[in-house]
Amino acid sequence: MTLRILGSTKLLGVFGYPIEHSLSPLMHNAALEELKLNYCYIPFKVEPKKLGGAVGAIRALNIRGVNVTIPHKVAVMEYLDEISLEAEIIGAVNTICNDEGILKGYNTDGKGFVRSLKEDACEDPSGKKMLLIGAGGAAKGVAVQLGLEGVGQLTIANRTPEKAENLARLVNKAVDENVAVPSSLGSKDFIRAMNEADIIINATPIGMYPYIDDSPLQDENLINSETLVCDLIYNPLETVLLRTAKTRGARTLNGIGMLAYQGAIAFNIWTGALPPVHVMKKTLVNALTPIKY
Ligand code: NAP
């Protein structure tokens, strides 16, 4: 890749703290290069106490847009002019677009997961029975988007039950219907939901590097061969959960698609171009593959 910065080059970037581990610069610059777009995507290490100043710099430096990652996704909202519907419901922003000084916040995480579900696994969440394990930041984005996409029934199970209850309440309020039900990990309701689910999603870090031998399920033998099992984890590409699901005859989906599509949706918001998702995915997989365990 040859980096060519001109006087007319437009700026994109990502705000996080820390930021060194982020794969977004690699993924977005590969996509910009593929389409020969005159943009450059830069990592910005933004200390929490300097977040307001950093958002001001988006306007001052005429940066077209940024992604926002941990720990800024919630705190950044107070500095923005407009918030999209899904970001407002989720209460977190991962993408900002600068339209002539007006900063609008979006949340593309849940949308990214649903796009991956549709494009990579050929599954539409509409009317489906789903089991979501976890109720943290990623689970929130996914649950809200599944609600907005017309999920049939969503059981949310979490180690801390109150968080599952709060998330189920949030989804039901957003869609004005009782589609989400909280559950406790390992309970009878949980096992029934697991048996009946069309789609199971792990939205916890259990199984993520370096704890690659761990699984969020105590008994994977309960996985049906008709179920699609999804893991939001992308490092490793195949978690123990996905490996076991495969041996049970189930289809599987890892977190690479969600990561690529959340970026692709942001890319489209900033540039208006159709993102080269295959290039974004390949760049991510190549960046992760050299990791040896
Ligand atoms: P988070 O906000 O910290 O939430 C973590 C969730 O996992 C919480 O519900 C937590 O339960 C649960 N959990 C953590 N450790 C647990 C354990 N030992 N046993 C049972 N439950 C446990 O994290 P997050 O940002 O949502 O991220 C969750 C996962 O999604 C991570 O693996 C991350 O890499 C992945 N992710 C992927 C993408 C993608 O694009 N593919 C995007 C975002 C995140 P409590 O509420 O009880 O603490």
Image: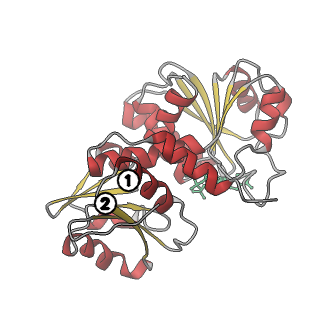
Q: Position of residue 30 (x, y in %)?
A: 46, 54
Q: Crowdedness of circle 1 by 10 Å Cα count: few (<14), some, many (20+)?
A: many
Q: Position of residue 228 (x, y in %)?
A: 66, 26
Work out whether 118 lies above or below 31. Answer: above
Residue at image position (47%, 27%) is 178
Tell me how far mark 2 sits from mark 1, CA to CA: 7 Å
Residue at image position (73%, 41%) is 185
Q: Check disc 2 and give the amino acid type.
A: Tyr
Q: Position of residue 264 (x, y in %)?
A: 41, 45
Location of residue 254 by image quarter: top right
Q: Check disc 1 and give the amino acid type.
A: Leu
* Helix, strand or loop status at disc 1: helix
Asked whether 42 or 70 is in front, the reply is 42
Asked whether 182 or 24 is in front, the reply is 24
Q: Position of residue 43 (x, y in %)?
A: 44, 70
Asked whether 118 or 43 is in front, the reply is 43
Q: Quadrant of the C terminus?
A: bottom right
Residue 169 visible here: no
* Helix, strand or loop status at disc 2: strand
Rendered image: mark on residue 32: 1
Q: Mark 2 highlights which residue? A: 39
Q: Is residue 7 left or right of residue 186?
A: left
Residue at image position (70%, 46%) is 237
